[in-house]
Image (spheres, rainbow, N blue to C red):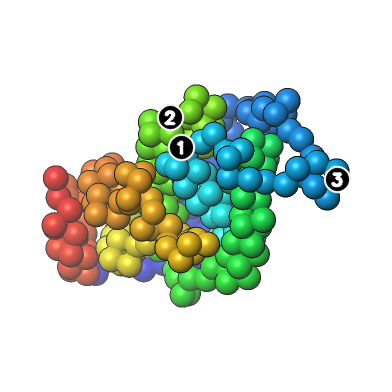
Amino acid sequence: MQNALSDRELLESLAPVVETNLARHIAAAAEWQPHDYVPWSDARNFEFLGGTDWDPSQSELSEVAKTALTVSVLIADNLPAYHRELGKYLRTGHWWRWVGRWTAEENRHEILIRNYLTVTRAVDPIALERMRMQHMTDGFRRPPMHLPDVLAAWAFEESAAAIRHRTTATLAGDVIVATIADRLAADDELQAVFFANLVAAALDLIPDQTVRAIADRIADFHTPVVQLSDGRTSDEVLAEAGIYDRANEAELVFRPLLEQWNIFTRTDFGEEGEKARAELAHLRG
């Protein structure tokens, strides 16, 4: 039977891996500025400052682009809740530095998208603000998890976010929106690599505990859901737009990571690990 590690022991054991991957992440991440992507010359005052309030005729974006950016900015707006959920597990040393870096990158996404949507009058700013208030008031909470579960969950979520943004770039029908979506996807992909590398390291230390966490997180995986003003959920509208369909998660999100982690070829699983691997057999390519 494999020796188990407590979350505290695993935090300490993986600390050097976190330090190495944080340095790799920072070196690989391209420096970019949110203001560069916003066409500020299109800006004008709203009625409160003597201008004209929003009207649907002012929007020049496709419905796909508006849907994708609205969902993305509302998810990013809820960053305090995600920061809290991640930070409560990783408040030590280089782990905490990574939480800070990740939070700063995610906040930059929100800044860019909201400025773009407001300046270009792509969506109703009042409706967007009302949805933001409701979404953040509802918040986001996870049930208590162990560290391997946290790492696996974030690896899957960042991979899913990257797919959502890459697909948005191909379907947007607008050069600037495509550029923005590709820029966000590049950040998501690097973040996914960070979490995936930590999962790989955990698999080498505690294979049974980690593959159990992977199986559990796949079983209850769900990307963040936003309730939109028309009563539909982001899941529904993203699937209808062809941006992200949960029916394709196995192929697009889970299988690539399971292959990267050599889940189906490893020989170091004990009895409990084999049980977890059996639950993942349907995802074998």
Q: Nearer the viewer, residue 132 or 206?
A: 132
Q: How many marks?
A: 3
Which numbered marker is on residue 134? none
Residue 170 shows up from this direction: yes
Q: Is residue 256 left or right of residue 183?
A: left
Q: Are marks 2 and 1 in contact (CB under 8 Å)?
A: yes
Horizontal arrangement in the rendering, residue 138 relative to residue 34 (left or right) = left
Q: Which one is in front, 196 or 42? A: 42
Residue 46 or residue 264, whichever sits in front: 46
Local SS, label 2: loop
Place of residue 75 in the rendered image (x, y in percent of width and height, measured from the top left):
54, 55
What residue type is disc 2 on?
Answer: Gly
Is residue 41 shown above or below 139? above
Can see residue 198? no
Q: Few, some or many C-alpha atoms within 10 Å of disc 1 (few <14, some 14-19, many ≥20)?
A: few
Q: Which residue is mark 1?
A: 62
> Is 117 drawn above or below residue 281 in the view shown?
above
Q: Residue 180, image x and y in percent? A: 54, 32
Quarter location, residue 130:
bottom right
Please, what is the three-letter code of the amino acid marked with disc 1?
Ser
Q: Residue at x 37, y 37 (%)?
A: 167
Location of residue 128 in the rendering, given as x and y in whole percent from the top left corner: 61, 55
Q: Tell me which label, 2 or 3, sits earlier in the chain.
A: 3
Circle 3 residue:
49
Q: Secondary structure at mark 3?
A: helix
Give the CA separation, mark 3 to mark 1. Answer: 28 Å
Q: Which callout, 2 or 3, points to the residue nearer the camera?
A: 3
The residue positioned 58% from the left and 40% from the top of the image is 57
